[in-house]
Image (cartoon, rainbow, N blue to C red):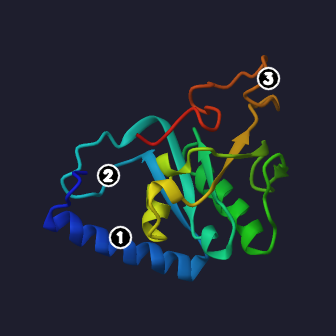
Amino acid sequence: MSPTPTPQQSAWLDQDDARVADVIRRHGVCLQLIGMGTCSVPGCTCSAESKRPFAYTIGLFGIAHPELVIVGVGMPEVASVLNSAARLVLDGARLTPGENVVLPCWDRRIFVEEVPNPGDIAFGANRHYQRPAEASVPLLQLTYTDNRGRFPWDPRYTGARRRQPRPGEWDAR
């Protein structure tokens, strides 16, 4: 999108802001999906499909918790994993870097990691909370195992490392 939105883009952004706020009010969290389908922004020429799709929550920062991001997972797993992890937080849990998490909805283990460059990723969350990139909402990356239970830093990891890069080694651009 251009730096100065067109009138159509401004109208779309206003409607999207209202939609995000409504979803958070009703469900406690809204999911921002990137690279998993068509782009709905008027006039956008981006490629909506990505070899590295990712998604993150918007809404947890409002209850003093970092937002959650997961990389390289497609639908419907991404919605199930993020909604389940967010439900833990909304029910009072605090996810912290270095923690191992098991979710009943998924057969993979998750390792929670701090993202050092959240301002380069969480554009929608920062828009919702009206924060500039340099004062971004914090993000925790949910790093998951391959189908043999190995994390990406294990030399025997069988997943595609480029689909699940290490925190700080990727951004949304």
Q: Residue placed at 80% from the left, 74% from the top?
A: 92
Mark 2 or mark 3, whichever is nearer to me:
3
Number of dots carrying numbers:
3
Residue 108 vs 21, above or below: the answer is above
Q: Earlier in the sequence, mark 1 or mark 3?
A: 1
Residue farthest front in this picture: 134
Whole-angstrom CA distance, mark 1 to mark 3, is 40 Å
The residue tagged 1 is: 16
Q: Is residue 6 left or right of residue 124?
A: left
CB contact under 8 Å: marks 2 and 3: no
Whole-angstrom CA distance, mark 2 to mark 1, is 13 Å
Q: Residue placed at 83% from the left, 51% from the top?
A: 102
Q: Secondary structure at mark 3?
A: loop
Q: Earlier in the sequence, mark 2 or mark 1?
A: 1
CB contact under 8 Å: marks 1 and 3: no
Which amino acid type corresponds to the residue marked 2 in the rendered image?
Answer: Cys
Residue farthest top in this picture: 155
The residue tagged 3 is: 154
Q: Nearer the viewer, residue 98 or 42?
A: 98
Quadrant where the C terminus is found in the figure: top left
Q: Residue placed at 14% from the left, 68% from the top?
A: 7
The residue tagged 2 is: 39
Residue 108 vs 102, above or below: the answer is above
Q: Nearer the viewer, residue 24 or 76?
A: 24
Q: Measuring from the top left, give residue 65's x and y in whole percent.
A: 69, 66
Residue 26 vs 55, above or below: the answer is below
Q: Residue placed at 44% from the left, 69% from the top?
A: 130
Residue 47 vs 21, above or below: the answer is above
Whole-angstrom CA distance, mark 2 to mark 3, is 35 Å
Name which quarter of the figure residue 64 lies in.
bottom right
Tag shown at residue 2: none
